[in-house]
Image: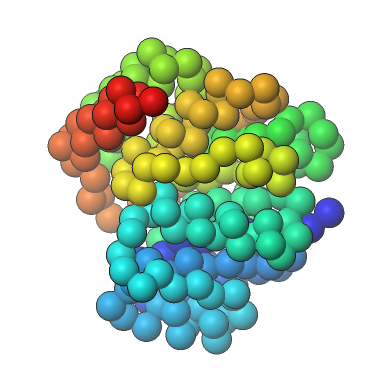
Amino acid sequence: MKIICVIPAWNEAKHIVRVIDKVKPLVNDVIVVDDHSTDNTSELAKNAGAFVLRHPINRGQGASLQTGSDQALKMGADIIVHFDADDQFAATEIPEVIAPLLKQEADVVFGSRFLGKKSNLPFSKKYLILPLGRLINHLLGAHTSDPQSGFRAYTKEVAHSFRIENNEMAHCSEILIKLSQGKWRIKEVPITVTYHEYGQKFSGGLRILKDLFIQKIRQ
């Protein structure tokens, strides 16, 4: 069973080596997709032992995840893990996230910040963005507790079944909605998130909703 972790990165020189060092012992391969960083993210990631792809232009996190997932399938992945480059997720929880896949209890596993573990959620995420995200996801057929978690894992069959079309902030909800509307067995597991910076504002949540509605209209 080959497990490959995909890490999208943009100007993450500060964190990328530490994240790779934590993730690498827990998976078979690590793929870092450098989304046209202006720092030395790519060089650092290569030196840390990751397989590195670099976008020729900045395309967004959703596009980086799709690029990395495509490469993971080419490398023979049975399970693909999505993990952020900013050192907010706990790499030690990767075994907990992939366990339902290994036991064949689920096809998709979403990490949730709201199932019991402690995370230092900023006010805007907890009381503004989260309720808005849950509302739109519910309206579009998704019923999980965490609408914007970037820590997830799924099988190669799931990876072959869909494409991430939203390059920007709404890609998390897009993935969740598409897979919720499919035939896949979905499970959530609690994860811990430690926020080092509090960058996402209420306007970011509104932009996610706008992107999702535009995508829905175009379908």
Judged from this view, the residue extending furthest toward the front is: 218
Q: Residue furthest top?
A: 139
Tell which of 72 and 129 is nearer to you.
Answer: 72
Residue 153 percent across, percent down from the top left? 63, 44
State the residue in front, 119 or 112: 112
In this picture, residue 32 sits left or right of residue 38: right
Q: 104 above or below 9?
A: above
Q: Quadrant of the N terminus?
A: bottom right
| Picture layout, residue 89 above or below residue 160 | below
Point 81% across, 42% down: residue: 102
Q: Is residue 46 left or right of residue 87?
A: right
Report the side of 190 relative to 29 (left or right): left
Residue 64 found in image quarter: bottom left
Q: Residue at x 52, y 42 (%)?
A: 163
Q: Is residue 170 visible?
A: yes
Rendering quarter of residue 11: bottom left
Which residue is at the front of the view, 69 or 130?
69
Name the residue at 76% across, 51% down. Answer: 78
Q: How is the image coloured?
A: rainbow
Location of residue 60 in the rendering, given as x and y in whole percent from the top left corner: 34, 55
Give the quadrant of the C terminus.
top left
Give the vertical position of 156 relative to 4 (above or below): above
